[in-house]
Image (spheres, grey):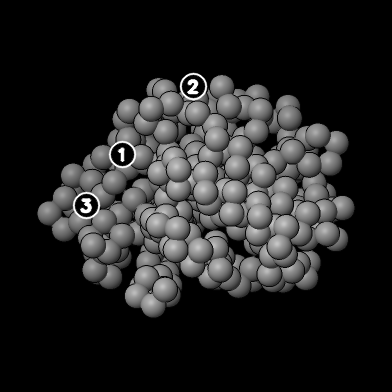
Amino acid sequence: MKVDGHTHTELCPHGSGDHLEAMVERAIELGFTDYWVTEHAPLPVNFSDAFGGPLDDIQTASLRIDQVDDYLELANQIKERFAAQIKVHIGFELDYLAGFEADRRHFWDHYGPQVDGGILSVHYLPGRDGRYYGVDYSPEELEQGFGELITQPQELYRYYFSQLQRAVNCDLGPNAPKRLGHLTLIKKYQDRFGLDTDFDATTWQAIERLLAQMVADDWEIDFNTAGLFKADCNDFYPGWEIAARAKELGLPLVFGSDAHATVEVGHAYHLFEKFSQKV
Ligand SMILES: [Zn+2]
Ligand SMILES: [Zn+2]
């Protein structure tokens, strides 16, 4: 089995526009046996009322609700067309948003049964003034929302992990996503802000709590290589130490390129392969 477990499509508004068809062909070329299409599920319709960052962020973050059926149709077509060469799995990357649990569950109640599974990710969390800010869109937005915490990176990390803990504890229903996306996305701009490379003992306690909960509830981890290619991150998510600890605990790690372009499919798979063999 060679799996790319996290990829996007031409319908992603912040993607390259590259077509799913070309991306799947690339995966076949690279010898992948399994390919997960996991487009960003729509944010709640009223999320903009609670959001404090630049509107362009949430306007380009995900599918619109009226695109979801087009997405499912596209993914199903490609799944059938390439069925003899590769197993295409259809899913969503669903945002966990603290305080919007009912909305998230509502989405999944409706669309979860139509897909093979999903990834639950935290891209937005409450920041300064109680409004939500993204940790992914730009360093300026990260600073706008979490400026005070940036000067105390361990606090920033612990705050992000506390949101992940809530995500894992949130009951989204029987067919809910059980893979946690890019656990250390909060480090996306680490080299811009000079954030700590390592986690201190207190932060590790939070990580251990999170991993223990994930083990107990049968979660998987997104071994996400996208951060390696981000100018201010230069590491994969969740990083070597957490990945090694997760493996020790028996948590399954699923390779995910998080490709938004054909050239990104399978990016740094060899790192994952080596990790899997040596750790
Ligand atoms: Zn994306
Ligand atoms: Zn993501």
Q: Which residue is mark 3?
A: 87
Residue 165 picture location, percent across and down: 60, 42
Give the residue type at disc 2: His
Q: Earlier in the sequence, mark 1 or mark 3?
A: 3
Q: Is residue 54 above or below residue 241?
A: above
Q: Which residue is mark 2?
A: 106
Give the residue type at disc 1: Asp
Task: Bin the neighbour count of mark 3 within 10 Å (Cα to Cα): few under 14, some 14-19, many 20 and up.
Answer: some
* Distance Cα–Cα, label 2 vs label 3: 28 Å
**Quadrant of the frame with the C terminus:** bottom left
Quarter of the rendering containing residue 250: bottom left
- Front residue of 131 and 99: 99
- Front residue of 83 and 115: 115
Q: Which residue is mark 1?
A: 116
Q: Residue at x 26, y 56 (%)?
A: 34
Marks 2 and 1: CB-CB under 8 Å? Answer: no
Quarter of the rendering containing residue 98: top right
Residue 25 picture location, percent across and down: 26, 61
Secondary structure at numbered mark 2: helix
**92 sits left or right of 23 in the view:** right
Secondary structure at numbered mark 1: loop
Q: Residue at x 61, y 54 (%)?
A: 207
Mark 1 residue's CB less than 8 Å from ligand 2? no
Mark 2 residue's CB less than 8 Å from ligand 2? no
Marks 1 and 3: CB-CB under 8 Å? Answer: no
Residue 12 picture location, percent across and down: 48, 46
Q: Is residue 204 above or below residue 272?
A: above
Residue 139 appearing in the image: no
Q: Residue at x 23, y 62 (%)?
A: 1
